Image: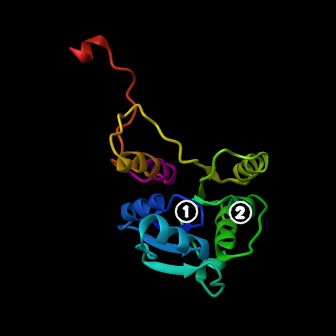
Amino acid sequence: MRLIVAVTGASGAILAAKLLEQLTEHETHLIVSDAARAVLRHELDREALPAAFRYGEDDWSSPLASSSFVADGMVIVPCSMKTLAMVAHGMSSNLIGRAADNVLRMGRRLVLVPRETPLSLAAIENMRLAKMAGAIVLPPNMAFYFGPQTLDDMVGFVVGKILDALGLPHALYRRWEGPATLEDET
Protein backbone atom coordinates (compact mmCIF):
# COMPACT_ATOMS: atom_id res chain seq x y z
CA MET A 1 0.00 0.00 0.00
CA ARG A 2 1.01 3.62 -0.53
CA LEU A 3 0.18 5.51 2.66
CA ILE A 4 0.59 9.06 3.90
CA VAL A 5 1.27 9.47 7.62
CA ALA A 6 1.12 12.96 9.10
CA VAL A 7 2.35 13.78 12.59
CA THR A 8 1.13 16.97 14.27
CA GLY A 9 2.04 18.74 17.49
CA ALA A 10 -0.38 16.96 19.80
CA SER A 11 0.98 14.65 22.48
CA GLY A 12 1.19 11.03 21.36
CA ALA A 13 4.26 10.81 19.13
CA ILE A 14 4.71 7.23 20.36
CA LEU A 15 1.60 6.28 18.36
CA ALA A 16 3.14 7.60 15.12
CA ALA A 17 6.43 5.83 15.82
CA LYS A 18 4.72 2.48 16.48
CA LEU A 19 2.50 2.86 13.40
CA LEU A 20 5.48 3.56 11.14
CA GLU A 21 7.28 0.51 12.59
CA GLN A 22 4.28 -1.57 11.48
CA LEU A 23 4.25 -0.07 7.97
CA THR A 24 7.81 -0.92 6.91
CA GLU A 25 6.56 -3.20 4.12
CA HIS A 26 4.48 -0.37 2.65
CA GLU A 27 5.40 2.81 0.79
CA THR A 28 5.13 5.50 3.45
CA HIS A 29 5.09 9.25 2.85
CA LEU A 30 5.63 11.11 6.13
CA ILE A 31 4.68 14.72 6.83
CA VAL A 32 5.93 16.11 10.15
CA SER A 33 4.71 19.51 11.31
CA ASP A 34 7.09 21.94 12.97
CA ALA A 35 5.25 21.52 16.28
CA ALA A 36 5.49 17.72 15.94
CA ARG A 37 9.28 17.97 15.77
CA ALA A 38 9.28 19.59 19.21
CA VAL A 39 6.93 16.92 20.56
CA LEU A 40 9.13 14.15 19.11
CA ARG A 41 12.15 15.63 20.88
CA HIS A 42 10.26 15.95 24.16
CA GLU A 43 8.37 12.63 24.17
CA LEU A 44 10.75 10.31 22.29
CA ASP A 45 14.07 12.16 22.45
CA ARG A 46 14.39 12.16 18.66
CA GLU A 47 13.36 14.24 15.66
CA ALA A 48 13.11 11.67 12.88
CA LEU A 49 10.76 8.79 12.23
CA PRO A 50 11.27 6.01 9.66
CA ALA A 51 9.58 6.48 6.28
CA ALA A 52 10.36 5.98 2.61
CA PHE A 53 9.69 9.68 1.86
CA ARG A 54 9.67 12.70 4.20
CA TYR A 55 8.16 16.17 3.88
CA GLY A 56 7.77 19.28 5.98
CA GLU A 57 4.39 20.89 6.52
CA ASP A 58 5.29 23.76 4.16
CA ASP A 59 6.67 21.59 1.33
CA TRP A 60 4.25 22.73 -1.37
CA SER A 61 6.46 21.22 -4.11
CA SER A 62 5.75 17.76 -2.67
CA PRO A 63 3.78 15.37 -4.92
CA LEU A 64 1.34 15.03 -1.99
CA ALA A 65 0.08 18.56 -2.74
CA SER A 66 -1.62 17.29 -5.91
CA SER A 67 -4.72 15.14 -6.16
CA SER A 68 -2.91 13.33 -8.99
CA PHE A 69 -0.81 11.65 -6.26
CA VAL A 70 -2.64 8.39 -5.65
CA ALA A 71 -2.45 7.22 -2.06
CA ASP A 72 -4.34 4.25 -0.69
CA GLY A 73 -4.95 6.12 2.55
CA MET A 74 -3.72 8.64 5.07
CA VAL A 75 -3.39 8.68 8.84
CA ILE A 76 -2.95 11.82 10.93
CA VAL A 77 -1.51 10.60 14.23
CA PRO A 78 -1.57 12.27 16.63
CA CYS A 79 -4.03 14.78 15.20
CA SER A 80 -4.01 18.17 16.91
CA MET A 81 -7.24 20.11 17.32
CA LYS A 82 -5.86 22.71 14.89
CA THR A 83 -5.35 20.03 12.24
CA LEU A 84 -8.73 18.48 13.00
CA ALA A 85 -10.36 21.88 12.40
CA MET A 86 -8.40 22.28 9.16
CA VAL A 87 -9.60 18.91 7.88
CA ALA A 88 -13.19 19.43 9.06
CA HIS A 89 -13.44 22.73 7.22
CA GLY A 90 -11.51 21.74 4.08
CA MET A 91 -8.68 24.18 4.74
CA SER A 92 -5.38 23.53 2.99
CA SER A 93 -3.15 25.95 4.85
CA ASN A 94 -0.27 23.43 4.99
CA LEU A 95 0.70 20.18 3.30
CA ILE A 96 -1.08 18.09 5.93
CA GLY A 97 -4.40 19.83 5.27
CA ARG A 98 -3.88 19.72 1.51
CA ALA A 99 -3.01 16.00 1.47
CA ALA A 100 -6.00 15.20 3.70
CA ASP A 101 -8.29 17.20 1.41
CA ASN A 102 -6.93 15.33 -1.61
CA VAL A 103 -7.44 11.96 0.07
CA LEU A 104 -11.05 12.81 0.95
CA ARG A 105 -11.79 14.26 -2.49
CA MET A 106 -10.52 11.08 -4.12
CA GLY A 107 -12.63 8.86 -1.85
CA ARG A 108 -9.66 7.28 -0.06
CA ARG A 109 -9.42 6.40 3.65
CA LEU A 110 -8.43 9.21 5.98
CA VAL A 111 -7.92 8.15 9.61
CA LEU A 112 -7.76 10.94 12.20
CA VAL A 113 -6.40 10.13 15.66
CA PRO A 114 -7.38 13.23 17.66
CA ARG A 115 -5.38 13.47 20.87
CA GLU A 116 -7.06 15.82 23.31
CA THR A 117 -9.04 15.46 26.48
CA PRO A 118 -11.45 16.65 27.64
CA LEU A 119 -13.07 17.67 24.37
CA SER A 120 -14.52 21.09 23.72
CA LEU A 121 -17.80 21.50 21.86
CA ALA A 122 -15.81 22.89 18.90
CA ALA A 123 -13.63 19.74 18.81
CA ILE A 124 -16.69 17.49 18.93
CA GLU A 125 -18.31 19.47 16.12
CA ASN A 126 -15.11 19.27 14.06
CA MET A 127 -15.04 15.50 14.55
CA ARG A 128 -18.65 15.35 13.36
CA LEU A 129 -17.84 17.43 10.27
CA ALA A 130 -14.74 15.35 9.50
CA LYS A 131 -16.80 12.16 9.78
CA MET A 132 -19.45 13.61 7.48
CA ALA A 133 -16.70 14.43 4.96
CA GLY A 134 -15.65 10.78 4.96
CA ALA A 135 -12.88 10.61 7.56
CA ILE A 136 -12.58 7.83 10.11
CA VAL A 137 -12.31 9.48 13.53
CA LEU A 138 -10.35 7.16 15.81
CA PRO A 139 -9.60 8.68 19.23
CA PRO A 140 -6.81 6.75 20.98
CA ASN A 141 -9.13 5.25 23.58
CA MET A 142 -7.79 2.41 25.65
CA ALA A 143 -9.34 -1.04 26.06
CA PHE A 144 -8.74 -3.43 28.91
CA TYR A 145 -10.51 -6.65 27.88
CA PHE A 146 -7.28 -8.11 26.43
CA GLY A 147 -5.34 -7.66 29.69
CA PRO A 148 -2.69 -5.09 28.74
CA GLN A 149 0.37 -5.20 31.00
CA THR A 150 2.65 -2.53 29.53
CA LEU A 151 2.59 0.83 27.81
CA ASP A 152 3.56 -0.98 24.60
CA ASP A 153 0.43 -3.16 24.95
CA MET A 154 -1.74 -0.02 25.19
CA VAL A 155 0.01 1.69 22.27
CA GLY A 156 -0.23 -1.52 20.27
CA PHE A 157 -3.99 -1.62 20.80
CA VAL A 158 -4.46 1.88 19.36
CA VAL A 159 -2.09 1.24 16.47
CA GLY A 160 -3.89 -2.05 15.82
CA LYS A 161 -7.16 -0.15 15.56
CA ILE A 162 -5.53 2.24 13.06
CA LEU A 163 -4.35 -0.73 11.00
CA ASP A 164 -7.86 -2.21 11.21
CA ALA A 165 -9.25 1.06 9.83
CA LEU A 166 -6.78 0.84 6.92
CA GLY A 167 -7.72 -2.79 6.28
CA LEU A 168 -4.24 -4.08 7.16
CA PRO A 169 -3.65 -7.32 9.10
CA HIS A 170 -1.76 -7.30 12.39
CA ALA A 171 -1.27 -9.16 15.65
CA LEU A 172 -0.90 -6.19 18.00
CA TYR A 173 -3.68 -7.15 20.38
CA ARG A 174 -5.94 -10.09 21.18
CA ARG A 175 -9.34 -9.60 19.60
CA TRP A 176 -12.52 -9.90 21.66
CA GLU A 177 -13.95 -13.41 21.51
CA GLY A 178 -16.70 -13.01 24.05
CA PRO A 179 -16.71 -13.48 27.81
CA ALA A 180 -14.97 -16.47 29.29
CA THR A 181 -17.31 -19.15 30.64
CA LEU A 182 -16.87 -21.09 33.83
CA GLU A 183 -15.74 -24.09 31.77
CA ASP A 184 -12.95 -21.96 30.25
CA GLU A 185 -11.63 -21.16 33.72
CA THR A 186 -11.34 -24.78 34.89
Q: Which badge, 2 or 1, comes first in the chain's sequence?
A: 1
Q: For the N terminus, which image quadrant?
A: bottom left
Question: Tag 2: residue type?
Answer: Lys
Q: Can residue 3 be seen in this snapshot?
A: no
Is 169 drawn above or below residue 145 in the view shown?
Answer: below
Q: Which segment is the magenta one?
A: 160-169
Q: Residues within 10 Å of mark 1 (few under 14, many from 20)?
A: many
In x, y percent, where is residue 180? 33, 19
In x, y percent, where is residue 59? 62, 84
Which residue shows up at 59% across the image and 66% down it? Answer: 8
Farthest residue toward the front? Answer: 42
> Would residue 165 be counted in the magenta stretch?
yes
Q: For the C terminus, which image quadrant?
A: top left
Q: Between residues 4 and 21, which one lies in front from this camera angle?
A: 21
Which residue shows up at 69% across the image and 69% down it? Answer: 97
Tell which tag, 2 or 1, sits nearer the viewer.
2
Where is mark 2, residue-wise? 82
Q: Between residues 163 and 120, which one lies in front from this camera angle?
A: 120
Which residue shows up at 66% across the image and 84% down it? Answer: 60
Is 9 drawn above or below residue 167 in the view shown?
Answer: below
Q: Mark 2 and mark 1: span between their CA atoms?
A: 21 Å
> Would residue 136 be counted in the magenta stretch?
no
Question: Tag 1: residue type?
Answer: Gly
Where is mark 1, residue-wise? 73
